[in-house]
Image: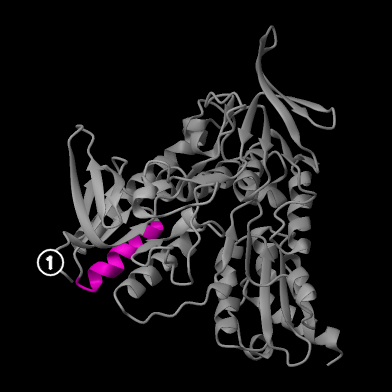
Amino acid sequence: MSAEYDYDLVVLGSGPGGQRAAIQAAKLDKRVAVVERKTVVGGVCINTGTIPSKTLREAVMYLSGYRERKFYGESYAVKQNITMADLLFRTDQVIRHEIDVTQHQLQRNRVEVISATGAFVDPHTIRLEHADRTARTVTSRVIVIAVGTEAAADPHIPFDGRRVFTSDDILKLDKLPRTLAVVGAGVIGCEYASMFAALGVRVTVIDKRPRLLPFVDEEIADALTYQMRENRVTMRLGEEVSGIETLNDDQGERVRIQLASGKQIITEKALYSIGRTGNTSRLNLEAAGLHPDSRGRFKVSNCYQTEAPHLYAVGDVIGFPSLASTSMEQGRIAACHAFGVEARSVPELFPYGIYTIPEISMVGRSEEELTQEGVPYEIGKARYKEIARGQIIGDQTGLMKLIFSSQDRKLLAVHIIGEGASELVHIGQAVLAFGGKIDYFIETVFNYPTLAECYKTAAFDGINRLGS
């Protein structure tokens, strides 16, 4: 690298994408620095997003006794009168551990971590403003922008972080509400709606789209809708919010949500979850010659280059799918490409995990996508209630669906809803990656009793549908 630069790579943001880009470059013996404006590393993923929400979910599942209710009745719970403090006890421990692990990974790979707010001075120069108000500039040959996103905050919504709040405020709640309205039925909205419902909170979900999670296979999304309704979640789909106001009267502090259809919803608290915007407003992007879209997101190449060849963007700041796992892979590919190292990735085989209750995972295309593309296919299904392990763990609603070519039986996709879906999907992902057929599942012996047997049952079901 040219000595005219202070660093070979500077990464803005220490979330999954930035962390992986930095470590990959360090392993290539490059001089690397990570700029993080927070006092701790990890970004949204560790501090307010992925890790907290998934740990919170696990605490909900355990303390509420949700997994055991099929055996011991709907009233069963490990702890009565669950509080936010109970839920956050586990969450706080996991967050501290993950921060420590991330710091250690960066240290042992000799990545310099700079606690400062960064902004472009020119395409290769970044001004760093530290908490003590001192400032300096650094230069880098390559820069990776991995600043993540923040919850979209409509200026017309009376956010107070207590009654009307975003997903970033969940960990600050002082108590569990009796009623909750979730505005926005995307991944984050559905995850939190199902968690609170499992705790006995009366939840109302509002979204102007006609169904949940439109990028998910329709049959799987319908199964989630059914299960959420079974947990007393009220769905207001195809409805648009026209106004939100807070109330203070003799009945206490409440929130009133007015719908465009004329309906109104009175609730104790409201979670506003209408998308996220890129954390790019502080970066002075004009100085670097970059022009994000109206939501602060970048358009990138398949190697994650922006319109400036030495500037890369990875993670949530480039939009869908906005998953920690995909962000990590994007960071790795960006660093390899920047320093001329060949690296291969197959985005169409990235698995998606949605941690609702029940959880959803998938890899490959949906039935709707294959139909639109004119691809002839058949399906094979296995229900958890047909599998011994499903009976043992008490999940009788889980479903696995294999989609395969009706011409040569080549596996095309795997869609799962149920306990352990995000772990189970990786078996199908491996078969997809090697171009395997569903015959593989028939010829393979799986441990008994396991949920992995669903693959064999679904494969037999699919072949029976072909009349073979």
**Relative to residue 426, is residue 105 depicted above or below?**
above
Q: Position of residue 246 (x, y in %)?
A: 65, 18
In the image, what residue type sits under mark 1? Ala
Horizontal and vertical percent position of residue 97: 33, 49
Residue closer to the observer: 435 or 307: 307
Magenta stretch secondary structure, dominant: helix
Magenta segment: does it hold 19? yes
Residue at 61% from the left image edge and 47% from the top image edge: 191
Q: Nearer the viewer, residue 256 or 157?
A: 157
Q: Quadrant of the N terminus?
A: bottom left
Q: Quadrant of the C terminus?
A: bottom right
Q: Residue 445 at what x, y percent from top left?
A: 61, 86
Residue name at image x 58 percent, y 28 percent: 155
- Taking the view exactly as shown, the residue that stands out farthest to the left is 3
Q: Is residue 384 magenta?
A: no
Name the foreground residue: 204 vs 195.
204
Answer with the quarter of the image where residue 340 lies. bottom left
Q: Is residue 20 above or below residue 191?
A: below
Residue identifier under label 1:
3
Circle 1 packing at 10 Å, graded few (<14), some (14-19), many (20+), is: few
Q: Is residue 254 left or right of residue 309?
A: right
Query: For the view shown, which residue lies furthest in the right direction?
Result: 467
Q: Is residue 167 visible?
A: yes
The stretch of residues the image draws in magenta is: 16-29
Task: Name which residue lies at 84% across and 27% down.
Answer: 262
Q: Is residue 365 left or right of residue 50?
A: right
Residue occupying image coordinates x 73% and y 93%: 408
- Determine the secondary structure under disc 1: loop
Which of the two residues, 117 or 193, is positioned nearer the viewer here? 117
